[in-house]
Image (spheres, rainbow, N blue to C red):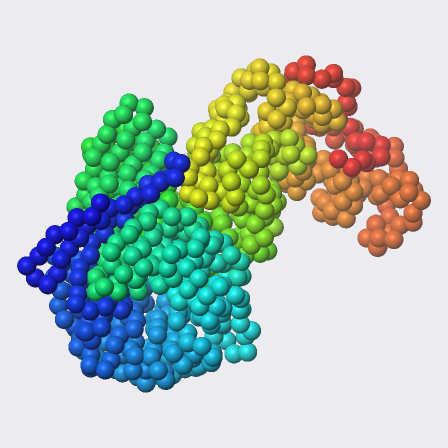
């Protein structure tokens, strides 16, 4: 639909709304407004949320006010000079802030110069830069340098004041597009059909690859998602990663791609061509396609909040597009941004609607955990799904919220100045910080929150993940971050269970999935590998189940912590099915209840479900209803469910349930081990043996030493053949040195070896090994345990397996457990 309105001035305004949808695709519209001029508009750039600049063939730079549609002339160029590109000095480099605007912009022109111009129109400096036209000029993200490219094939780096720092390259063809890398230490530029990434460091080898079948006309490199966007004369646009791997390639358009631009948050990008404006997801598929009658769209520029895009058009028109119809879903609620200042919430169960009006334009919104959080350009609104009539409202320090992440009790806001954790009552809880934090480039893959923890991947060193207490904002434990062996691409915290058991899922550069404990520090922290070729993942909202799309399969770990309990059980707790029904390169969006939402490569949404029984089992275990958990498993008769229960009960040291569950999955050796544990009269000793069953000998030893069970700690190391540690404990506590030496002697005799350990030889010379005395001392230790006042009775057998006549004594010959 196209509607045109004539104005008495030289401008006319037209509105255009077109939306496209494929098979359940999430609807998103671009609402277009166009102003006409008498000459071709060559370049365009946003200044702030409500102001933008436009340069045209009439040698005039105009300033537009998008609120009242007023325009004023800013700069008049000489008649032989035509503008080619403009770029405002980055807002982040000025310190951000809602009231802090850019005071300077760079204007490149056909006379080989670039001009530094203040926002009042005063030309601060003009610099001879290239032979022939300067085709592009870009400020670095920190504002410390300016990058220019020209018809002469050169790419140059200049200081902020306009002094030449270096000439990066000399190509044989014109360089039409340039872009800075996220850290402003690399440069992307075009070279005919090739794309080139070059470091600013001397002697660094550039990365070069063929990008298109025709000359590449435009490029953009987003600092948040670290993806590269290119468009060329072959009528295609493509998305690349920084290793030159093609992430997406469009079908051929009717005309060359003349402009490309990422949104600041890296979630969307816009494509311009002849009479074409397309809005796309970062993965490449299209949200909306507009066909304005404007000629070629030569330049695209996004507002700093990512809600508006401006286009410079060949017929003299300036397009302003507003993103509408953004849709959020959670449980039985659907929220849609129907207008720039309005959201409609629909309850699909009873078909009721709530219309939410806002004073300012909606920038970001998030719907999860029974709350809708909406950030406008000045305020944050918090709605409960139980009542949309009375929101909590608080003012925002910054004007641009780039990310909202929710947990059950808190939510996290990210803007250009920092990271903030709020309660759903609107109270600021904390603001996590670490040296070198760049909040402006955080995204949903690099920051996550749970009820008690915040995790942020460091940009300076991508192997490092900082973890903070969500209630205080202070670094956890000793303050040292989690350091992975490879660069971390994505982090995600589980949401349920006690804080001490919080787990962090990590996807690294190789797309391998690791699980690590957040609140365990130093060498005690265990990081274990769960899977390979992981494309995307999501934790369940109500239980600690983990879903992922991995290597052509849809995978759900019903109890990922089983890897810390019994690695042999982990494969038995994993559900897998082929992901071919989801197409190529699907993305996992949500895991709510037993439903999973997946987006296909072409943008359509599909849902799949898993068995409801694992979630029920989790709820029983969390509430301590072990008998109900056993009854559930007996009813369902599923080995996967029994394996989950075995791991859960072993982790919780619930011996009776563990015995039943292990017996149900035919783990006879572990059933026998549990039965022997039951014969131990002291609770701490039983807990130590369960820690040993879970593969944690260090924890087992610590439990025994803390409880004063030194003999059992020594015997534990003897059984594990940790001879040096056993002797160390015996000498330190001045007890059972002869016991350790005796078992060591039997061990060496059994394998026909001679003692070579100097420590054992030293103590063997002065201590006589008398097995009658050793056995008497051992029996005395067990007698002391039976007489301990805090002695607790062993759990009664559940009847899941036959009892054995274990004595709880030391084995004659130590065996590996």
Position of 19 with respect to 814 (left or right) is: left
Q: Nearer the viewer, residue 110 or 117?
A: 110
Q: Give the answer, above or below, for where 568 lies relative to 626.
A: below
Residue at the image point whose x is 55% and y is 31% from the top? 558
Position of 354 with respect to 596 (left or right) is: left
Q: Position of residue 265 (x, y in %)?
A: 36, 54
Q: For the C terminus, which image quadrant?
A: top right
Residue at the image point whose x is 69% and y is 21% from the top? 663
Q: Position of residue 154 (x, y in %)?
A: 43, 79
Seen as rendered, the residue at the extreme left is 8
Q: Nearer the viewer, residue 363 or 17?
A: 17
User: Which of the 4 image quarters holds residue 275?
Assistant: bottom left
Q: Give the answer, above or below, for where 261 lies relative to 540.
A: below
Q: For the N terminus, which image quadrant?
A: top left
Seen as rendered, the residue at the extreme right is 752
Q: Nearer the viewer, residue 782 or 633?
A: 633
Residue at the image point whose x is 54% and y is 41% from the top? 549
Q: Position of residue 277 (x, y in %)?
A: 31, 54
Position of 89 with respect to 742 (left or right) is: left
Residue at the image point whose x is 31% and y is 55% from the top? 276
**Does residue 288 show up?**
yes
Total residue callouts: 0
Q: Nearer the viewer, residue 109 or 497?
A: 109
User: Which of the 4 image quarters holds residue 435?
Assistant: bottom left
Seen as rendered, the residue at the extreme front is 254
Q: Give the answer, above or below, for where 602 lies relative to 149.
A: above
**Does residue 526 show up?**
no
User: Which of the 4 image quarters holds residue 132?
Assistant: bottom left
Q: Position of residue 471 (x, y in %)?
A: 38, 44
């Amino acid at each position: 639909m196209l509607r045109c309105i004539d104005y008495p001035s030289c401008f006319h305004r037209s509105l255009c709304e077109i939306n496209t949808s494929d098979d359940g695709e999430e609807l998103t519209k671009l609402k277009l407004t166009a102003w006409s001029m008498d000459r071709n508009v060559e370049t365009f750039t946003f200044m702030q949320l409500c102001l933008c600049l436009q340069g045209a063939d009439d040698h005039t730079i105009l300033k537009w006010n998008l609120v009242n549609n007023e325009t004023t002339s800013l700069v008049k160029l000489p008649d032989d000079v035509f503008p080619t590109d403009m770029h405002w000095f980055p807002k982040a480099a000025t310190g951000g802030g809602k009231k802090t605007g850019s005071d300077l912009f760079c204007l490149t022109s056909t006379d080989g110069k670039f001009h530094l111009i203040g926002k009042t129109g005063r030309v601060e400096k003009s610099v001879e830069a290239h032979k022939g036209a300067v085709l592009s000029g870009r400020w670095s993200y920190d504002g410390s340098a300016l990058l220019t490219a020209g018809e002469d094939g050169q790419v140059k780096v200049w200081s902020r004041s306009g002094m030449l720092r270096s000439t990066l390259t000399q190509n044989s063809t014109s360089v039409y597009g340039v872009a800075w890398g996220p850290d402003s230490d690399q440069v992307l530029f075009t070279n005919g059909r090739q794309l080139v990434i070059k470091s600013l460091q001397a002697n660094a080898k550039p990365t070069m690859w063929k990008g298109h079948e025709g000359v590449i006309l435009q490029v953009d490199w987003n600092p948040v998602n670290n993806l590269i966007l290119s468009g060329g004369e072959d009528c295609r646009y493509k998305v690349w990663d920084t290793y030159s791997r093609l992430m997406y390639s469009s079908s051929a358009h009717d005309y060359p791609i003349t402009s490309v631009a990422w949104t600041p948050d890296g979630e969307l990008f816009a494509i311009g061509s002849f009479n074409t404006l397309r809005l796309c997801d970062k993965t490449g598929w299209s949200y909306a396609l507009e066909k304005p009658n404007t000629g070629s769209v030569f330049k695209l520029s996004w507002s700093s909040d990512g809600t508006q895009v401006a286009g410079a058009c060949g017929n003299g028109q300036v397009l302003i597009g507003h993103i509408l119809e953004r849709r959020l879903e959670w449980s039985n609620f659907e929220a849609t941004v129907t207008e720039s200042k309005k959201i409609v919430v629909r309850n699909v169960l009873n078909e009721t609607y709530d219309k939410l009006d806002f004073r300012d334009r909606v920038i970001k919104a998030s719907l999860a955990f029974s709350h809708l959080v909406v950030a406008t350009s000045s305020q944050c609104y918090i709605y409960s799904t139980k009542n949309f009539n009375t929101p909590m409202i608080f003012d925002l320090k910054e004007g641009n919220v780039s990310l909202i992440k929710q947990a059950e009790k808190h939510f996290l806001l990210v803007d250009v100045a920092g990271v903030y954790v709020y309660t759903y009552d609107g109270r600021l809880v904390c603001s996590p910080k670490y040296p070198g934090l760049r909040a402006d480039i955080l995204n949903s893959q690099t920051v996550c929150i749970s009820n008690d923890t915040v995790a942020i991947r460091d940009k300076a060193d991508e192997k490092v993940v900082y973890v903070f207490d969500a209630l205080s904002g202070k670094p956890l434990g000793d303050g040292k971050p989690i350091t992975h062996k490879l660069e971390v691409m994505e982090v995600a915290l589980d949401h349920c269970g006690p804080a001490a058991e919080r787990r962090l899922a990590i996807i690294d550069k190789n797309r391998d999935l690791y699980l690590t404990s957040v609140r365990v520090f130093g060498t005690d922290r265990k990081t274990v590998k769960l899977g390979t070729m992981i494309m995307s993942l999501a934790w369940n909202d109500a239980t600690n189940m983990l879903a992922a799309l991995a290597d052509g399969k849809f995978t759900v770990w019903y109890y990922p912590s089983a890897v810390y309990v019994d690695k042999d059980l982990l494969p038995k707790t994993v559900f897998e099915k082929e992901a071919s029904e989801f197409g190529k390169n699907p993305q996992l969006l949500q895991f709510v209840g037993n439903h999973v939402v997946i987006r296909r490569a072409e943008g359509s949404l599909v849902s799949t479900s898993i068995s409801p029984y694992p979630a029920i089992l989790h709820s029983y275990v969390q509430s301590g209803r072990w008998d109900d958990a056993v009854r559930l498993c007996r009813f369902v008769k599923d080995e996967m469910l029994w394996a989950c229960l075995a791991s859960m009960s072993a982790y919780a040291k619930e011996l009776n349930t563990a015995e039943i569950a292990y017996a149900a999955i035919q783990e006879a050796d572990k059933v026998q081990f549990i039965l022997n544990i039951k014969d131990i009269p002291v609770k701490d000793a039983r807990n130590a043996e369960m820690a040993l069953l879970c593969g944690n000998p260090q924890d087992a030893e610590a439990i025994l030493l803390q409880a004063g069970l030194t003999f059992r700690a020594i015997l534990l190391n003897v059984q594990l053949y940790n001879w040096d540690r056993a002797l160390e404990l015996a000498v330190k506590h001045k007890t059972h040195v002869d016991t350790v030496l005796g078992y060591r002697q039997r061990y060496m005799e059994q394998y026909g070896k001679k003692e070579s350990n100097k420590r054992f030889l030293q103590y063997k010379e002065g201590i006589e090994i008398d097995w009658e005395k050793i056995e008497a001392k051992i029996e005395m230790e067990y007698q002391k345990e039976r007489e301990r006042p805090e002695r607790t009775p062993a759990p009664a057998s559940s009847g899941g397996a036959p009892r054995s006549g274990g004595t709880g004594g030391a084995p004659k010959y130590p065996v590996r457990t």
